[in-house]
Image: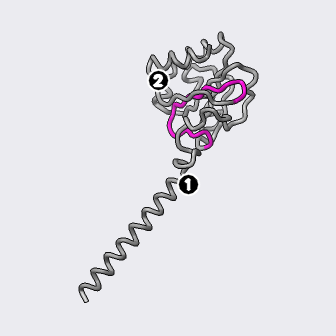
Amino acid sequence: MEKKLTMAANIAIIVVAIVAVTVLVRSWKYSGAGNGQGGSPKALIGKQFPVAQSWAANHKTVVLALSVGCHFCTASAPFYQRLMTYAGTHQANVVAFMPQSKEEGSQYLKQLGLNIPVVGQADFQQINVSGTPTLFLVDSEGIVREVWQGQLEENREKKVLSMLG
Protein backbone atom coordinates (compact mmCIF):
# COMPACT_ATOMS: atom_id res chain seq x y z
CA MET A 1 0.00 0.00 0.00
CA GLU A 2 2.80 2.41 0.91
CA LYS A 3 4.49 1.70 -2.42
CA LYS A 4 1.28 2.61 -4.29
CA LEU A 5 0.93 5.88 -2.35
CA THR A 6 4.54 6.82 -3.08
CA MET A 7 4.03 6.04 -6.77
CA ALA A 8 0.80 8.11 -6.86
CA ALA A 9 2.54 11.03 -5.10
CA ASN A 10 5.43 10.93 -7.57
CA ILE A 11 3.03 10.92 -10.52
CA ALA A 12 1.11 13.85 -9.01
CA ILE A 13 4.35 15.80 -8.57
CA ILE A 14 5.32 15.15 -12.20
CA VAL A 15 1.86 16.25 -13.43
CA VAL A 16 2.02 19.44 -11.34
CA ALA A 17 5.53 20.18 -12.65
CA ILE A 18 4.39 19.70 -16.26
CA VAL A 19 1.39 22.00 -15.72
CA ALA A 20 3.60 24.64 -14.06
CA VAL A 21 6.13 24.59 -16.91
CA THR A 22 3.31 24.82 -19.47
CA VAL A 23 1.81 27.83 -17.69
CA LEU A 24 5.21 29.56 -17.49
CA VAL A 25 5.95 28.96 -21.18
CA ARG A 26 2.53 30.26 -22.23
CA SER A 27 2.90 33.28 -19.97
CA TRP A 28 6.33 34.04 -21.46
CA LYS A 29 5.06 33.54 -25.01
CA TYR A 30 1.96 35.72 -24.62
CA SER A 31 3.83 38.46 -22.75
CA GLY A 32 5.63 39.06 -26.04
CA ALA A 33 9.07 37.95 -24.90
CA GLY A 34 9.14 35.14 -27.42
CA ASN A 35 7.32 36.62 -30.38
CA GLY A 36 8.88 40.02 -31.15
CA GLN A 37 6.03 41.96 -29.55
CA GLY A 38 6.68 43.38 -26.14
CA GLY A 39 10.16 42.21 -25.31
CA SER A 40 13.07 44.35 -26.40
CA PRO A 41 12.60 47.71 -28.11
CA LYS A 42 15.55 46.73 -30.35
CA ALA A 43 13.11 44.34 -32.05
CA LEU A 44 11.64 47.47 -33.72
CA ILE A 45 14.89 48.36 -35.54
CA GLY A 46 14.17 48.28 -39.27
CA LYS A 47 10.41 48.37 -38.69
CA GLN A 48 7.75 51.07 -38.75
CA PHE A 49 7.45 52.85 -35.39
CA PRO A 50 4.09 51.64 -34.05
CA VAL A 51 2.72 55.07 -33.08
CA ALA A 52 1.39 57.33 -35.85
CA GLN A 53 3.35 60.55 -36.19
CA SER A 54 4.19 62.95 -39.04
CA TRP A 55 7.71 61.65 -39.64
CA ALA A 56 8.23 63.14 -43.12
CA ALA A 57 8.47 66.71 -41.81
CA ASN A 58 11.96 65.98 -40.43
CA HIS A 59 15.02 64.13 -41.68
CA LYS A 60 15.25 62.28 -38.34
CA THR A 61 13.24 62.19 -35.13
CA VAL A 62 14.34 61.12 -31.67
CA VAL A 63 11.45 59.58 -29.77
CA LEU A 64 11.91 59.77 -26.01
CA ALA A 65 9.94 57.16 -24.06
CA LEU A 66 9.86 58.64 -20.56
CA SER A 67 7.78 58.27 -17.44
CA VAL A 68 6.80 60.82 -14.81
CA GLY A 69 8.91 60.31 -11.72
CA CYS A 70 11.49 58.10 -13.44
CA HIS A 71 14.78 58.81 -11.65
CA PHE A 72 16.89 58.05 -14.72
CA CYS A 73 14.69 60.24 -16.94
CA THR A 74 15.10 63.14 -14.51
CA ALA A 75 18.86 62.57 -14.30
CA SER A 76 19.04 62.57 -18.13
CA ALA A 77 17.32 65.98 -18.45
CA PRO A 78 20.57 67.93 -19.11
CA PHE A 79 21.32 65.61 -22.04
CA TYR A 80 17.79 66.00 -23.38
CA GLN A 81 18.23 69.79 -23.24
CA ARG A 82 21.42 69.49 -25.32
CA LEU A 83 19.63 67.05 -27.63
CA MET A 84 16.81 69.56 -28.23
CA THR A 85 19.32 72.29 -29.13
CA TYR A 86 21.36 69.99 -31.37
CA ALA A 87 18.27 68.61 -33.13
CA GLY A 88 17.06 72.15 -33.85
CA THR A 89 20.24 72.90 -35.80
CA HIS A 90 20.34 69.58 -37.68
CA GLN A 91 16.88 69.27 -39.27
CA ALA A 92 15.84 66.77 -36.63
CA ASN A 93 12.91 66.58 -34.28
CA VAL A 94 12.39 65.37 -30.72
CA VAL A 95 9.07 63.99 -29.48
CA ALA A 96 8.17 62.38 -26.17
CA PHE A 97 5.79 59.57 -25.35
CA MET A 98 4.72 58.66 -21.84
CA PRO A 99 2.28 56.23 -20.28
CA GLN A 100 0.72 59.10 -18.31
CA SER A 101 -1.72 61.65 -19.75
CA LYS A 102 -0.41 64.29 -22.17
CA GLU A 103 -1.07 66.99 -19.58
CA GLU A 104 0.82 65.19 -16.81
CA GLY A 105 3.66 64.37 -19.21
CA SER A 106 3.94 67.97 -20.43
CA GLN A 107 4.00 69.28 -16.88
CA TYR A 108 6.77 66.82 -15.94
CA LEU A 109 8.85 67.85 -18.97
CA LYS A 110 8.44 71.54 -18.11
CA GLN A 111 9.68 70.78 -14.58
CA LEU A 112 12.78 69.28 -16.21
CA GLY A 113 13.27 72.41 -18.33
CA LEU A 114 12.36 70.61 -21.55
CA ASN A 115 10.23 72.35 -24.13
CA ILE A 116 9.29 69.38 -26.29
CA PRO A 117 6.48 70.49 -28.62
CA VAL A 118 5.01 67.03 -29.25
CA VAL A 119 4.16 65.04 -26.14
CA GLY A 120 1.95 62.02 -26.51
CA GLN A 121 0.52 59.25 -24.44
CA ALA A 122 1.49 55.73 -25.52
CA ASP A 123 0.98 52.18 -24.42
CA PHE A 124 4.56 51.16 -23.73
CA GLN A 125 3.80 47.51 -24.55
CA GLN A 126 2.92 48.66 -28.08
CA ILE A 127 6.36 50.24 -28.50
CA ASN A 128 8.25 47.46 -26.67
CA VAL A 129 9.31 49.72 -23.79
CA SER A 130 9.77 47.90 -20.50
CA GLY A 131 11.98 50.50 -18.84
CA THR A 132 12.59 54.21 -19.09
CA PRO A 133 14.20 56.14 -20.51
CA THR A 134 14.26 54.54 -23.95
CA LEU A 135 15.25 56.54 -27.04
CA PHE A 136 14.34 55.63 -30.62
CA LEU A 137 15.94 57.18 -33.70
CA VAL A 138 13.27 57.24 -36.42
CA ASP A 139 13.85 58.30 -40.04
CA SER A 140 11.56 60.40 -42.25
CA GLU A 141 9.69 57.24 -43.33
CA GLY A 142 8.89 56.31 -39.72
CA ILE A 143 11.39 53.43 -39.66
CA VAL A 144 13.27 52.84 -36.40
CA ARG A 145 17.01 53.08 -37.10
CA GLU A 146 18.47 52.78 -33.60
CA VAL A 147 17.42 52.29 -29.97
CA TRP A 148 19.11 53.25 -26.72
CA GLN A 149 17.90 52.17 -23.29
CA GLY A 150 18.54 53.60 -19.86
CA GLN A 151 20.47 56.66 -18.73
CA LEU A 152 23.17 57.11 -21.33
CA GLU A 153 26.86 57.49 -20.60
CA GLU A 154 28.68 60.37 -22.30
CA ASN A 155 29.98 58.25 -25.20
CA ARG A 156 26.46 56.96 -25.94
CA GLU A 157 25.06 60.52 -25.73
CA LYS A 158 27.64 61.54 -28.35
CA LYS A 159 26.55 58.59 -30.52
CA VAL A 160 22.92 59.79 -30.40
CA LEU A 161 23.95 63.31 -31.43
CA SER A 162 26.27 62.09 -34.18
CA MET A 163 23.48 60.01 -35.73
CA LEU A 164 21.37 63.16 -36.11
CA GLY A 165 23.79 64.57 -38.65
Nearer mark to the viewer, of 1 and 2: 1
| Type of amino acid at the residue the image marks with label 1 | Tyr
> Residue at coordinates 52% horizontally, 31% vertically from top-left?
133
> Residue at coordinates 60% horizontally, 33% vertically from top-left?
45
The total of numbered circles placed on residues is 2
Residue 76 in the magenta stretch? The answer is: no
* Residue span colored magenta: 126-142
Dot 2 alpha-carbon crowd within 10 angstroms: few under 14, some 14 to 19, many 20 or more: some
Outermost residue on the top side: it is 89
Outermost residue on the front side: it is 46
Residue 128 in the magenta stretch? The answer is: yes
Kindly identify which residue carries mark 1.
Answer: 30
Residue 92 is marked as none
* Residue 131: percent from left, percent from top: 50, 37
In the image shown, does 40 or 7 lie closer to the viewer?
Answer: 7
- Label 1 and label 2: CA atoms lie apart by 30 Å
In the image shown, does 71 or 123 lie closer to the viewer?
Answer: 123
* Residue 69: percent from left, percent from top: 50, 33
Instruction: Looking at the image, tell me whether mark 1 or mark 2 is earlier in sequence order.
Output: 1
| Type of amino acid at the residue the image marks with label 2 | Leu
Q: Quadrant of the C terminus?
A: top right
SS assignment for the magenta stretch, majority: loop
Q: Quadrant of the N terminus?
A: bottom left
Against 34, is 107 above or below?
above
Numbered disc 1: secondary structure: helix
Kindly identify which residue carries mark 2.
Answer: 152
Q: Is residue 3 left or right of residue 16?
A: left
Dot 1 alpha-carbon crowd within 10 angstroms: few under 14, some 14 to 19, many 20 or more: few
> Residue at coordinates 33% horizontally, 81% vertically from top-left?
8
Quadrant housing residue 154: top left
Quadrant housing residue 134: top right
